[in-house]
Amino acid sequence: MKSKNNLYKYFYIENYGCQMNVSDSEIITSILLNHGFFLSEKIETTDIVLLNACSIREKAELSLTRKLEQLKFLKKKNKILFGITGCFSKKLKEFFLKEKKVDFFVEPDFYKKIPNIIQYISNDKIIPPSFFSKNRKETYEDIIPFSDNKKKITKFLSITRGCNNMCTFCIVPFTRGREKSSNPYSIIKECKRLYKIGYKEITLLGQNVDSYQYIIKNKSIKKDMMVKFSDLLSLLATEVPFMRIRFSTSNPHDMSESVLNVISKYPNICKHIHLPVQSGSNKILKLMNRKYSREKYINLIEKIRNIIPECSISHDIMTGFCGENEKDHQDTISLMNEIKYNYGYMFSYSPRPGTFSYKKLKDDVPKHIKKERLKEIIDLQREHSLFRMKEFIGKTQEILIEGISKRNNKNWYGRNTQNIIVVFPKKNFLSIGDTINVKILNNTSATLIGEID
Ligand code: 5AD
Ligand code: SF4
């Protein structure tokens, strides 16, 4: 279907939140371009503004609300359509509808309907309720995500959508639905296509990549074949042997030894695992419904370090969850001291409407305590990051050049296999997208500094 309306032709899309949202924005962009719409680089020259929302933490939702407030003048001045796509809570939707700030909402399983929705609105028609009947199978594997020609080096690719885990604090199972895995053949095809057009690194995305599974029905031998995450990784490692392969996020409960063996076996599978722990206290892990204990988690870290000694490990930790007392907090501190992660993402708990913890548990840690505990773990992580960075000094690392350093345009920046940023002086014989050996000479807590070896 081509866009028939003259009213709304140009769209602008802005992202709030995680890597998954970046990937979703590329899918939405492709869908609209395929339907005769045009991408507008500036918000001032557009007819349609799409804000791709994330509601996993309160902060992302607040910045979206602020943005809409800022854009109010545009809506008054021009006839612009405002749409919110992605993950948003029912509460947020109701608020925006009441305030008449947004023209339409599209949940993650219905992006293909955006062109029709715009058509309905431009014809002043009401969208029938049946239009959004549940679509449990949408993986978008038939859509080639949009590629920005300016940044053709690294790319995110969703391999699973949704999540079945039901951690009590998390809104994802409600906004993104049950887990769905994409067909491995489409994933391989897309990676091969990306490699052909110049991409050098792909990050496979999913809320819980380790639970990826796809059943291939083989009618001729009347036997089904199950492709698990470790199988998908081996397939990709051999089918696109010169492409770097990363993945995120791993769930400690589902990460298998076979995945670790595959990472260790193939040089093009990057040696980095993002393994959110959330808390070091067994009591809190149970309240979070995280299905592993502190001991099992530490055991898994030992396994990773045995099988892939050079592997870097990062985390997500949440402070101030319901019922967290000083002892629980100290359990998190001691776990961090035991593991000494390379880096991590740290948050304080914010109740999300609709989740189990919002409905059934008491958000009983005072704000100032949440803040203090968060600061303590951030400071500790900085110490650990410095410690881990020092381990690279004097070593030669293979770096994929991703661009020119923002701080000094005489330097390149890129990443090593462990996903650590490395900066080093530019040389004329190299260009963005090349891989080069760099000797590490110095460091900060977030960056390694080196020179070409
Ligand atoms: N409050 C704070 N942080 C949260 N996260 C998920 N839900 C919440 C919440 N309600 C964090 C978790 C998760 C990361 C993506 O976001 O640490 O791993
Ligand atoms: Fe949310 Fe837990 Fe699923 Fe992660 S694993 S998306 S925290 S429910």
Image (cartoon, rainbow, N blue to C red):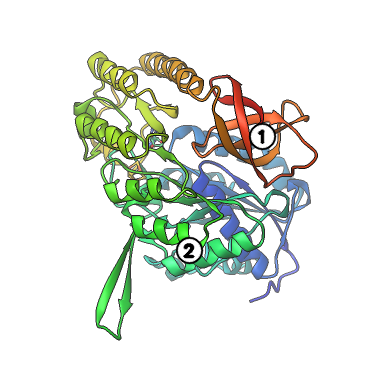
Residue located 58% across and 69% down the image = 116
Q: Which mark is residue 413?
A: 1
- Which residue type does callout 2 highlight? Ile
Quadrant containing the C terminus in the rendered view: top right
Q: Identify which residue is drawn at 57% across, 31% down.
A: 396
Name the mark on residue 151.
none
The quarter of the rendered structure image containing the N terminus is: bottom right
Query: Residue lying furthest bottom in this view?
Result: 220
Q: Who's the residue at 61% across and 21% down the image?
A: 441
**Residue 360: x and y, percent?**
23, 36
Q: Nearer the viewer, mark 2 or mark 1?
A: 1
Residue at the spot 27% in from the left edge and 26% down from the top edge: 322
* Along the line of sight, the residue nearer the viewer: 410 or 98: 410
Res. 182 in view: yes
From the viewer's perspective, tell me whether residue 396 is left or right of residue 247. Answer: right
Q: Earlier in the sequence, mark 2 or mark 1?
A: 2
* Residue that mark 2 sits on: 187
Disc 1, SS: strand
Report how far apart the C-alphas of labels 2 and 1 lie in the structure: 28 Å
* Label 2 Cα neighbours within 10 Å, binned few <14 / some 14-19 / many ≥20: some
